[in-house]
Amino acid sequence: MLKRVSYIFAIALVFSCNSSEKVEKIEKKVTIVDGTERYDVYQGSEMANLMRGMHAFNLQLKKEVESGKITTEFPEAFLKIHSAEFSESKSRNQTFDHYSGKFIEAQKLVFTEDSNVALSERYNNAINLCVSCHQTECTGPIPKIKKLLIK
C-alpha cells in the first residue's frame, strides 16, 4: 500500500512539474518577488523586444529628420529582424521575410546622403513598410506605428 502511494505521489510530482513548465513557456511570464508581494511580469519575445527598440529608435530619428539633420547611424541591431525568435503563437513566413527585407533596405536609405528623394519621404517609406507588414498580421501596434509618420 505504501509503495502504491509513493508511486502515485511520484507520478503526480512529475506531471505537475511538466505542466508548470509548459505554462511558463507559453505565457512567458517572470515572477518577481518584492518583499512579501509576488508579481507575474510579461516577458516579450525576442522579436517583440526588437520591434519595441525599433520604435524607440525611430521616434528619436523622426525628431532628427524633422530638424533636417541626422546625427545617428543605421543600427546594425535592426538586422536581427531576420533571426529574432517570435512568440510561440507566431512564426516567420514569406510575407514577413519580404516586408522585413524591404524595411531594412528602406531604413538604410534614410541614412544615405546622396539621394534624390527627400529625407522625410525616405523616412516615411520605411515606417509605411512597418504598417504594411503589420496589416497582414499582428495589427495591434499599427496606431502606435502611424504616430511615427511625418505629416
Image (cartoon, rainbow, N blue to C red):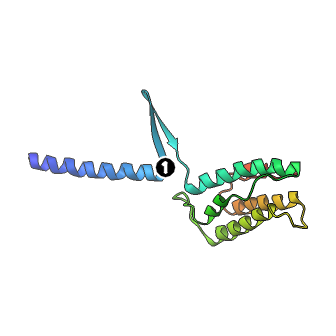
Residue at position x 72%, y 50% in the image:
57
Vertical arrangement, residue 115 with respect to residue 31, above or below: below
Residue at position x 21%, y 50% in the image:
10
Q: Amino acid at mark 1?
A: Lys
Foreground residue, 137 or 121? 121
Residue 84 relative to residue 61: left or right: left
Q: Position of residue 42 (x, y in %)?
A: 53, 44
Q: Position of residue 88 (x, y in %)?
A: 51, 58
Residue 15 relative to residue 77: left or right: left
Residue at position x 87%, y 48% in the image:
67
Query: Quadrant of residue 123 in the image?
Result: bottom right
Q: Position of residue 138 (x, y in %)?
A: 65, 57
* Residue 104 shows in the view: yes
Residue 85 relative to residue 7: left or right: right
- Most distant residue in the left direction: 1
Residue at position x 76%, y 64% in the image:
108
Residue tagged 1: 28
Tag 1's secondary structure? loop
